[in-house]
Amino acid sequence: MQQPAPPTPSNADAVPLRGWQRAAIWLLVAVLLALVFMLYTQPEFMVRMADHVWACF
């Protein structure tokens, strides 16, 4: 005999984001991505990251 699935949480209690909050989140994500892309243009950083990844094995 199968048991019933557990109840799923409802999003009815969630407060929707305001327009400026959504824009702030997207701006933060864009800034973080830009910083990461800037790091990848530095050869020393890439060598250091490769050394760290290689050290894991």
Image: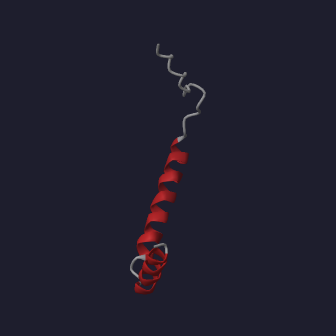
Q: Position of residue 56 (x, y in %)?
A: 49, 72
Q: Position of residue 20 (x, y in %)?
A: 54, 47
Image quarter for residue 46? bottom left
Residue at coordinates 48% horizontally, 58% vertically from top-left?
A: 29
For this orientation, the residue located farthest to the front is 1
Q: Position of residue 10 (x, y in %)?
A: 55, 25
Q: How many marks?
A: 0
Instruction: Decide which of 2, 15 is in the foreground and name it.
Output: 2
Q: Position of residue 17 (x, y in %)?
A: 54, 39
Residue at coordinates 51% horizontally, 43% vertically from top-left?
A: 19
Using the image, determine if residue 34 lies above or below residue 23.
below
Instruction: Decide which of 38, 8 is in the foreground and name it.
Output: 8
Snapshot colouring = secondary structure
Image side of residue 24 versus residue 40, left or right: right
Q: Quadrant of the C terminus?
A: bottom left
Using the image, determine if residue 21 lies above or below residue 54.
above
Residue at coordinates 56% horizontally, 25% vertically from top-left?
A: 12
Image side of residue 50 versus residue 18, left or right: left
Residue at coordinates 53% horizontally, 53% vertically from top-left?
A: 24
Instruction: Decide which of 4, 39 is in the foreground and name it.
Output: 4
For this orientation, the residue located farthest to the top is 1
For this orientation, the residue located farthest to the bottom is 44
Image quarter for residue 50? bottom left
